Amino acid sequence: MQKIRVIIAKPGLDGHDRGAKVIARALRDAGMEVIYTGLRQTPEQIVAAALQEDADAIGLSILSGAHMHICPRVMELLHEKGLNDVLVVVGGIIPDVDIPKLNAIGIKGIFLPGTPMQEIVEFITRNTHSRVGF
Amino acid sequence: MKAASPAAGASRERRGSFTTISGRPINELYTPADIASLDYARDLGDPGDFPYTRGIHANGYRGKLWTMRQFAGFGMPEETNQRYKQLLKAGGTGLSVAFDLPTLMGRDPDHELSLGEVGKCGVNVTSLADMETLFDGIDLGGITTSMTINSPASMIFAMYLVVAEQQGAAWESLSGTIQNDILKEFIAQKEYIYPPRQSMRLITDIFAFCAERVPRWNTISISGYHIREAGATAAQELAFTLRDGIEYVQYGVDAGLDVDTFAPRLSFFFNSHSDFFEEIAKYRAARRIWAHVMRDRFKAKNPRSWQLRFHSQTAGVSLTAQQPYNNVVRTALQAMAAVLGGTQSLHTNSLDEALALPTEEAATLALRTQQIIAHETGVANLVDPLGGSYFVEKLTADLEEEALAYFDTIDRMGGMVAAVETGYPQREIAESAYKFQQAVEQRDKIIVGVNDFVNPEEEPIGILYIDETTAERQLAKLNRVRQTRDNGRVRAALDALKQGARGSANTMPLLIEAVRAYATVGEMCDALREVWGEYEETPII
């Protein structure tokens, strides 16, 4: 069975990486191939990593409030590169009012503080099925 | 041992493990047998006496209450200036500046990584012009200010000094704190710019400069707060923070400073988490360990060098986005632990901080929480009320023992800079963070409103939104500064800074000149990036 390949990325200037690292480890323990980009990645670097690693999913960890600037840019670049089937999920501090806006640009999963790791594992597994051909 | 015979008690006990939030097993009962080896004079001493386990002041809070210092900052300097005036009017007794990520990372608002970050997590300060606005109408000679700034600490501190000078306040009279703790950035919060050894140089430059010119300033706030937030246990927070302290003192001594000239100005910053007694024991252990370190390891002679003073903040990581009013209760209990542990100053988090920066109402309620503890509960009437408790004394001794074991490990690695370079504390913390998350998932640890007592029908609360035009307005201001300043003077000051950084000159006077010329934070940080390069960590998951 082919492993799901996930990029976990920390865009922007923020260095609070506890959540990104815990999730990266949980996904790895769940049998996925996890590539953690490290800190301070520009949208360009994140999309380049997704292309190079042939990623099935990208998980963005954003706590700083910059999500409405970073997420649209990532989606735009993915479309430009023709990576329309890469699942994009976001975890972090996202105000309720921004959730529909993020959904509207194609971000399927938005995980707020307190989300069980298992829920994220299941969401990514379910939404990458068609791509990895389970 | 009388307590906790599992076979006898098991049938009567609740489900779940009896451990602290750090995973430390706790007995059913503590008795004199647990503290049989405790010697009052040697291990505790009266408050105000070595080793200061019971506190650094003989009369505790009867002389002076802790400083109620609420961390605040957002958007433009103008907006934050208004919030400061409101906090001072509400009875706050000190200021505490939160900067935004571009400022913290030494980037101007026009840098590509500043996209969406200007004014979001704190106030944006790009040049002296912003610092002038931030403290407009606030007498820097009459208040104390804490500034949470690390990699660009020297640049921001230089701006503060120049604003004070403009107001006519003598540097000798200024009092406050810069966080200036780069080791915990490498370990936990990751807001580093330069490699560790060059970063340490900036810090020892500040020690030397302040010992001579700003003698009442706290030159560093050696911080466990962020280490704990990143997932460390209480013992790890204690151990890594104090071992960082040892590293700074060693670097100061190695730079040729007499330990007693700078050690009295070192201060600490701890987390106040949810496990009530473990936190109180942690503060008591910290004072005892530090007193011994300074007297025995560094041979400091001045008792002020032996006394560990600390700020504390309730645990941001314990706040939940679910049922946010529960956070008021969490914060009150955590604040009580910090007070019973003898904190010198305290920040209480606001109920909405798992969702956004706090609203004015939420920030006021957080301050009121401290005022209620200070004036209504009676806990500030006496010193160290839990001293002598079998449990608290045993826990204090156990935490001390664990911290000292970590010291040995890190000493063997060649010190904290070397340990950080190999990723040792980073790995220890990531491991603890993952274990805690698993305990939550397995419901071995209960978080009310998150994995138990959940309310599916929650009404959202009103939160603070940062004006999205902040970046635009700060950018316009930056352009005006660049057009009106003497750019020749800026270039000369930045060249002199680079020259000094290549050699061994103290960087502080060079930065003060650059600040006076209205060089920006980004320009000053870039000048040093050119000479020293940038640090990149190897991510550990």
Image: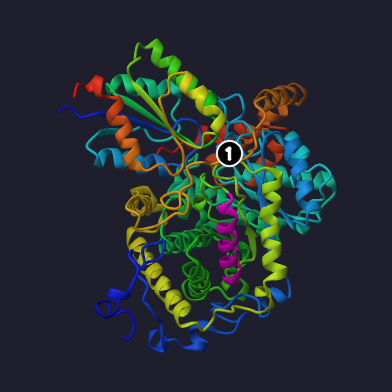
Residue A68 quadrant: top right
- Estimate how packed mark 1 is, as few (under 14), some (14 to 19) or many (20 or more) residues with alpha carbons within 10 Å: few
Query: What residue lies at 73% left-to-right and 36% top-to-bottom?
Result: B77
Q: Secondary structure at mark 1?
A: loop
From the viewer's perspective, is B472 left or right of B191?
right
Q: Is A20 placed above or below B66 here?
A: above
Q: Is A131 placed above or below B301 here?
A: above
Q: Amino acid at mark 1?
A: Pro
Residue that numbered label 1 is attached to: B460
- Find the magenta span and give its range: B325-341
Residue B457 position in % (x across, y down): 51, 41
Decide which of B42, A96 is in the foreground and name it: A96
Decide which of B273, A21 is in the foreground and name it: B273
From the viewer's perspective, is B315 left or right of B375?
left
Residue situated furthest front in the rendering: B457
Query: What residue lies at 65% left-to-right and 37% top-to-bottom?
Result: B464
From the viewer's perspective, is B134 left or right of B471?
right
Quarter of the image where the C terminus of chain B is located: top left
Q: Is B510 placed above or below B117 here?
A: below
Residue B21 quadrant: bottom left
Question: Does residue B326 show up magenta in the picture?
Answer: yes
Residue B379 position in % (x across, y down): 65, 74
Residue B539 shows in this picture: no
Residue A87 position in % (x across, y down): 35, 23
Question: Does residue B384 show up magenta in the picture?
Answer: no
Quarter of the image where the N terminus of chain B is located: bottom left
